[in-house]
Amino acid sequence: MPLQLIRSELLCSENFIAGRWQSAAAAAHYDVVDPASGTVFAHVPDSGPADARDAADAAAAAFGAWRARSARERAQLLKRWHALIQANADDLARLISSEQGKPLAEARGEVAYGASYVEWFAEEAVRAYGDMIPEPVRGKKLMVVKEPVGIVAAVTPWNFPLAMIARKIAPALAAGCTVVAKPAEDTPLTALALVRLAAEAGIPDGVINLVTASRAQTPAVVQAWMDDGRVRKVTFTGSTAVGKMLARGAADTLKKLSLELGGNAPFIVFEDADIDAAVDGLMAAKFRNGGQTCVSPNRVYVQRSVYDLFAARLTARVAALKVGPATDPEAQVGPMINARAIEKIVQHVGDALAHGGTVLTGGERLRLAGVAGTTFFAPTVIGDACPDMRLAHEETFGPVIALFPFDGEDEVVALANDTPYGLASYFYASDLARVWRVAERLDSGIVGINEGALAAEAAPFGGVKESGYGREGSRYGLDDYMHTKYLCMGGLR
Ligand code: NAD
């Protein structure tokens, strides 16, 4: 284990089904790797369809009793879980850093962020109000109640191993649903520790069931849930390609879906912006998790009159970032998650240079002295970017910023919206009329206005276009896990 735990029992290496820790039916395992060193430090079950079905059976068996609990009881259990996440924050952060690679300080931030969703949905559980509708004819009463959708299947990514699963399981449980979950193959350990804490909090057996699987086995595990008519909802965060497959798969049993998919966020700096604030905002938005974040700006559009000034200030900041493993307390950017991820970054940078881009800083893989890992990439700024580059159209998911000069507002809004994605956009400007014009014209689910840090449990997180649908967090977040049922009572004359 790259970072030792205080409570060693939080390093769990079995599936959690019906309240029991168990191996995969086929007794297969796969390796968990520390991306900073490339060493294997744990093994978890390589589950198959039989394990997925066991998990769904357990969730089905637990559903009736769980939905029958009062909202207050469910809220209290979620609050206890929240308290245990906070009490074990150091260990959870060590697990995140060990399997995912982000610096420890950032991992602690992720624990607090993930925990905030558990607390939020504990508070929302008791506010899943229905409605009384004024009757259109006499002698009838028209009512609306909210009901849990049923079993929820959660499939989560590796970039936020705790926060992504917490913000799916917490609303599901608050609504009265039970869950089957599969964390990303690269980062199963944080999720397993999280469900151990849920069990310690008293969340009943079968309410949360978690199976792990390698990338090769994952499609079969998830397919078992897609084929299962008892699973009524799928909630997924990850690539658009997999999200589309799940949307197709969900059609046969018409499951409800929440898809939080890829982005290619534009970040626009107008000439009337506070340039230093814009640099600060971009640094915060871009280098969280080394750029491996779905709301990370990929395309930075800078008005020509301030382009050189902005490029110089930004480049100085980026060049000063410290790259290193999570065991280095000064590291600000960790390794990329795996070989596939860094290969994509290398290709995007090569393609940008082939299309006339210039490297202002970085631009290459790094081999760090005394560190065995091979997935470190230098924080990079590319100047003179143009729309022909791959990074103008695809998510790079790494520490690479491309600067595109622009001249006018209409031009830059068209460029920003010229993408199939629509998760987040950012812009910096001071003219209030411009602020409202641009905020309304950007096609994305989230807009940062003179702000680089957007995510909060109280706010609705989600996209438009091929960035998916559904919202996580906020007072809207519970709706994705509930049905609206209409009750009509007659004979009241
Ligand atoms: P991915 O979509 O392949 O993985 C996300 C989750 O989907 C994981 O749990 C994975 O096991 C699962 N999965 C993979 N193939 C599946 C299949 N056929 N059926 C069912 N589930 C499947 O993402 P990735 O390959 O790890 O990353 C690729 C790119 O996706 C990244 O470069 C980035 O652009 C994007 N991404 C976005 C987010 C986000 O936060 N929106 C997170 C991770 C990755």
Image (cartoon, rainbow, N blue to C red):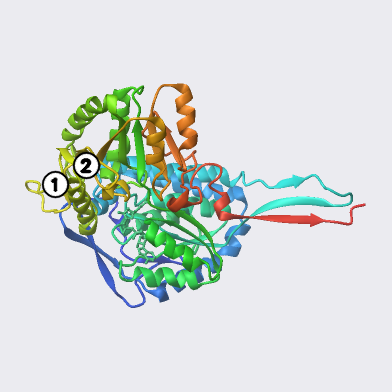
Between marks 2 and 1 in the image, the one whose residue lies nearer the viewer: 1
Which residue carries the number 2 mark?
333
Q: Looking at the image, is 279 positioned above or below residue 230?
A: above
Please tell me how many numbered marks the rendered image carries. 2
Q: In the picture provided, is 112 more to the left or to the right than 362? A: right
Q: Earlier in the sequence, mark 2 or mark 1?
A: 2
Instruction: Return the x and y of residue 287 as percentages of the image width and height.
Output: 27, 39
Q: In the picture provided, is 434 more to the left or to the right than 297? A: right
Name which residue lies at 35% across and 23% down: 273
Which residue carries the number 1 mark?
364
Location of the N terminus by quadrant is bottom left
Instruction: Return the x and y of residue 146 as percentages of the image width and height.
Output: 65, 52
Write down which quadrant ligand 1 falls in. bottom left
Q: Looking at the image, is 241 positioned above or below residue 58?
A: above
Instruction: Return the x and y of residue 400 as percentages of the image width and height.
Output: 23, 43
Dot 1: element: loop
Label 2 beta carbon less than 8 Å to ligand 1:
no
Q: State the image quarter where residue 188 is shown.
A: bottom left
Q: State the image quarter where residue 181 is shown.
A: bottom left
- Frontmost residue, 285 versus 23: 285
Q: In the picture provided, is 238 more to the left or to the right than 290? A: right
| Amino acid type at mark 1 | Glu
Name which residue lies at 55% across and 52% down: 480
Dot 2: element: loop
Instruction: Return the x and y of residue 189 as percentages of the image width and height.
Output: 31, 57
